[in-house]
Image (spheres, coloured by chain):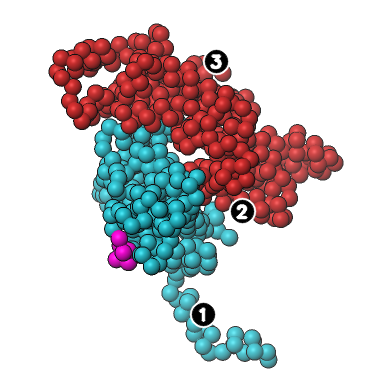
Chain colours: A cyan, B red
Amino acid sequence: MTDAKKRLNSQEFAQTVSEEMITSRSFWADARRRFLGHRLAVFSIFMLLALLLFAIFGHAFAQWSYEEIDWNVLGRIKTEGGPNWENGHYFGVDELGRDLFARVVQGSRTSLMVGFVAGPLAVLLGATLGALAGYFGGRLDQFIVGFYTIWISIPYIIFFVVWQAFFGRSLTQMILVIILVNWTAGLLIVRGQVMMLKNREFVDAARMLGMSDFAIIFKHLAPNILWVIVIYTSIVIPEVIMAESLVSFLGVGIQEPNTSWGALISEGAKTMTFGTLWQLGYPAAFFVIAQVSLYYIGDGLRDALDPKDRR
Amino acid sequence: MFNYTLRRILTVVPTLLVLIIFSFYLMRLAPGGPFTSEKPLPPAVMKNVLERYGMDQPLYVQLWTYIKNIVFHFDFGPSFSQKDRTVNDVIAQGFPVTLTYGFWSAVFVLVLGIPLGIVAALRHNSFWDYTMTGLAIFSQIFPNFVLAPILVLLFTLSWGLLPGGGWNGGQWEYIIMPAIALGTSYMAGVARLTRGSMLEVLNAPFILTARSKGLPERTIIWRHALKPALLPTLTYMGPVFVYMITGSVFIDVFFSTGGIGQDFIDGAYSRDYAMLLGLAVLYSLLTFTLNLLLDLMYAWIDPKVRSNL
């Protein structure tokens, strides 16, 4: 008997297999296994965690605050403003002599905050509307879908800029607008799912037990469409970060001295003719790392959760 | 077909009206205005200025005049911050610029994206396929505002091949970089989508039939596979046009092309109501028109859609 056969016949093997068969795997446990099998996605999770930790605790390591001007290097930024461990400017200074490390920490905070607060909230809004449209159908459905169709053909960044120009440029303001303009995310797919699920037996059963429509939607349908919402959130978060960065790049994003990745990239791009490339490089690197990790996390989630995507 | 077009145009009109009314009130209700400055104007001067721009009248009268002027004279009124120019002047000057590189960018997206996708599908799982897919992911992660500085860094600052900005009457050297910076990520998107749908079509039964009839590969691809494979790409172009139009604002600002994007952002800084609203309406009008043309094209290509109109 070969070793492999011996192993297959052993007591322990039978034990583990039977245990695995007795404890049936739930949908989410199954998804977790598949996700963990996606190496790039798991690696990306760690990258993203590192970014989040950097954004939250980064200020503790900075030698300068993000709005303080280092008069020693101002005026000689091209020669002495570069990344330097001795004077505490790990990433160098920006064109006004402010510490770039502290500014990148601050920028990461803003961008990640916008992404992780506005993104999920926007999807939640869209999903709720989609669920209502799908569940009730009829006039409400026509109205919501009609409005959706018109909405997606509007160049929303344009109205984002208009809004920003007139209503201040604070962080809360920004998050609010992003939710307002991104409410279409995930609407159609949630609507489709709800339309499919609402005729199933468990919904009939719940209705017969006297549950209200809203209780059915949020208690019985919501858990069943949670996977769609998770996938959509993973798509919307990088999009939202991108939109915020674009608007900040255009100069109508978050107010100075507060900053974001887009604003930092914009400043770096303006000064690159002077050869101060670190001012473009560091913010751009952070932005790209965030986008890459979010992309692969989304990819992993799609593989893990989408029944159509099963390999 | 005619009825459908008419119906579409009829939905555009109320949408635009709602957009105008909403933005109009939004702007006027917001604190501050184009004439608020650090040093307040003397009341008498302020009164004259407001009168000059018709801002002393009630809001609904202003709104009515505004809409009337757009509809009957296509007149967006005077700019509030650039004293000697009207919004129409700005559009007449900047819009052709934006349209020119926008057009070339769209050409770049389609002429490069579609063949790349087809080649990747035909050489499925080959080196080219992987390179293409890798590039597509890569360029989706590098949005235009990261790509554009990198392009300038390489082509202008390092190699000195192309001018890093400006327009110069639209010479081709000045168009290349804006068009590429604007189009690259959508080009990648188009390539990826075309690849996917082409793969799907190539596995369809009617292609098998064509193959077993003994048709040459070229005929199969050009006459049978191409049209259905391009349909998803065409639907994707709708959102792409929307993104490209918003992207053009960035391109105008970054490359100083003199397009309307720069005036739009300046208008946002100086709270120039007329400029902002006029250009926002123009941008929306452009998107609606492009989307309508696209849908008509879709109906023209796909008989299933046509019969449903």
Q: Name the spot of residue B212 as percent of width and height, x first.
A: 82, 43
Q: Residue at x 37, y 29 (%)?
A: B266
Q: Name the spot of residue B42 as percent of width and height, x first.
A: 15, 19
Quick check: A168 above or below B24? Answer: below
Kind of element beneath mark 2: helix
- Which residue is under mark 2? B134
Label 3: few (<14), some or many (≥20) within 10 Å?
A: few
Label 1: few (<14), some or many (≥20) within 10 Å?
A: few
- Which residue is under mark 1? A17
- Write down the chain letter for disc 2: B
Q: Residue at x 53, y 22 (%)?
A: B96
Nearer the camera: disc 1 or disc 3 = 3
Nearer the camera: disc 1 or disc 2 = 2
Q: Name the spot of residue A240 as percent of width and height, x first.
A: 40, 46
Kind of residue at disc 2: Gly
Instruction: Mark yes or no: residue B45 visible.
Output: yes
Q: How far is the residue under mark 1 from the one under mark 3?
A: 67 Å
B52 in magenta: no
Q: Residue at x 74, y 42 (%)?
A: B207
**Magenta stretch, residue numbers:** A59-64
> Residue B2 shows which numbered tag?
3
- Write down the chain letter for disc 3: B
Q: Name the spot of residue A267 as percent of width and height, x first.
A: 41, 46
Kind of element beneath mark 3: helix
